[in-house]
Image: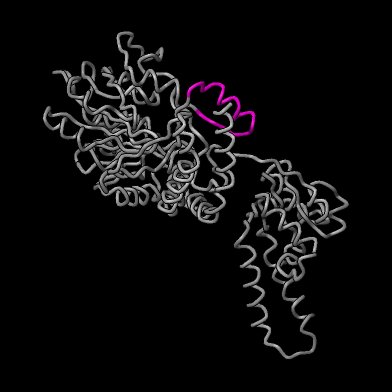
Amino acid sequence: MTDLILDAGITVAACERKSADEPITALLDKADKEGWRIWLYTAQLAEVLQKLTLNADSNIGFQHVDMNIVQFNERQQLSKFASKHHWLSALGEDSEGLNFDDPTGHGLTRAAARLGKDVKVVTDIPSRLDSGNPFVDVCTAMKQKSSLHVDFVDLKGQQDRIRSRIEHNVHKVMSHGKYIMGPEIRELEAQLADFVGVEHCICLSSGTDSLLVAMMALNLSEGDEVITTPFTFAATGEVIKMLGAKAVYVDIDSTTYNINIDSIEEAVTDKTSAIMPVSLYGQCADIDQINAIADCHGLSVIEDAAQSFGASLRGRKSCGLSTIGCTSFFPTKPLGGYGDGGACFTSDKQLADSIRQLIDHGQDKKYNHKQLGINGRMDTLQAAILLAKLHSFEDEIVRRNEVANNYSNMLFKAEEKGFLRLPKIMEHNESVWAQYTIRVDNRHKIQEILNKSGIPTAIHYPTPLYRQPALLQEEVVCVNTEKVVTEVLSLPMHPYLNIETQEWISKTLIQALES
């Protein structure tokens, strides 16, 4: 992706351009067409406004005009232009060039370096142009080469839309200095609990730890059995084994890829203590039916909702469907932080209190360790970031569904021809589309063609858990799982994937399938 920072004079020219023939107009048109990111440097805000006002004043001449109105109009003009682009924050390091002949130029150089080594600053100041990289004039900026780049998950594009909110929240934490269990933790927990529709949310260090402490709170231990699915990330089986319990793997439904409800009952034994369904790829397993089975046998249900936070089952949110819901805020999840993080959800106060103790070394008060626990607390900075991202999360769910519908509309004819299988969402479900995962034959070849074309793909997941060396259960074979793991292929998926890129991905995929 091409990034350009506009120096103050260029920003003013961009705001005031009146002719389509102006070089700055051509540059901005090219940037818009090719998806470049245009940045305005916050340290130059006063300078830009001053230049705009002076230019307006010189254009007015001797006419008697209220300068307050002129200044207001110039601010509105800048605001309109900036709304289509991005503000790049000035940091403390930018002021280290105060002894230089051009301290603002030094600040721009430092700001450009933060964005990346190839970032250019477009300027009309001769001394800055003479100093060389990163400064270029408009004509040179026009010659920047664009390459079509597709992110599997576009975290930068998401950050661009909420940058000011993230920066505000992070600076707030840096100011109060409560990096562990700061006020943002409780604020996030309250908002997440309200979103899901449960009484209690406990934020913690990762999705894996959320599964671990959920089972610890339910007193699962050596000799217990937990019914789950083998088609998931290793963490699901890993935490079961870590507690000395045994994972009892039930095959998946070959349409939804979630646990096969019809096979759960026969897996129940007198050692079974819990059922842990995984809501895979963003679609809830049918927890209602699983709860009914669990109630008959006096079992707890833990939803592994690492990929489904934001999804719904019959109008109720994932994570609020069972005894305890567990999710992950890993960066690429539907609601992802900028590091590891997770949460447990429940409406059982006793379980919630136990989980809070467990993630704080088992303490019920300082230096009184009531039970054996772990250090599983979420960092306050992650909570601050998640609070910023949660603000736009519901809009992103809508966007994710639009992107998924686009893919399905573009690829359904290829499915009719038998080239692939598209994901299917049950009528009672609303998916959050953590992944858009198709099934293809000759997956390795298809993936190779897509990758050579610049289209990233992923395989979630290539090996059943019972065949993982650390979780090996040689006697287990799940027929549907064994087939699906050889065929699934996930395409780029995020809320800001534009239609043109999807068309190109789909066209390239179809060509690969037909070849």
The image shows residue 469, relative to residue 394, as above or below, that is: above
Quarter of the image for the N terminus: give it: top right
Q: Where is residue 161 shown, x and y percent of the image?
A: 54, 54
Judged left or right of residue 419, residue 37 is right
Would you say residue 447 sits in the magenta stretch? yes
Taking depth in this image into account, of 112 and 251 the one nearest to the observer is 251
Q: Where is residue 418 shown, x and y percent of the image?
A: 45, 29
Q: Where is residue 351 shown, x and y percent of the image?
A: 22, 37
Q: Where is residue 91 shown, x and y percent of the image?
A: 64, 52
Q: How many marks?
A: 0
Q: Residue at x 38, y 47 (%)?
A: 185
Q: Is residue 358 visible?
A: yes
Judged left or right of residue 467, residue 43 is right
Q: Residue at x 34, y 52 (%)?
A: 191
Quarter-wise, where is residue 252 in the image? top left
Q: Residue at x 23, y 17 (%)?
A: 222
Judged left or right of residue 19, residue 67 is left
The image shows residue 45, relative to residue 331, as above or below, that is: below
Quarter of the image for the C terminus: give it: top right
The image shows residue 185, relative to residue 465, as above or below, that is: below
Q: Which residues are magenta?
A: 441-458
Residue furthest top as drawn = 474
Residue furthest front as drawn = 417
Q: Is residue 363 visible?
A: no
Q: Residue at x 51, y 23 (%)?
A: 443
Judged left or right of residue 266, residue 315 is right
The image shows residue 168, relative to residue 308, as above or below, that is: below
Give the image's coloring scheme: one colour
Would you say residue 61 sits in the magenta stretch? no
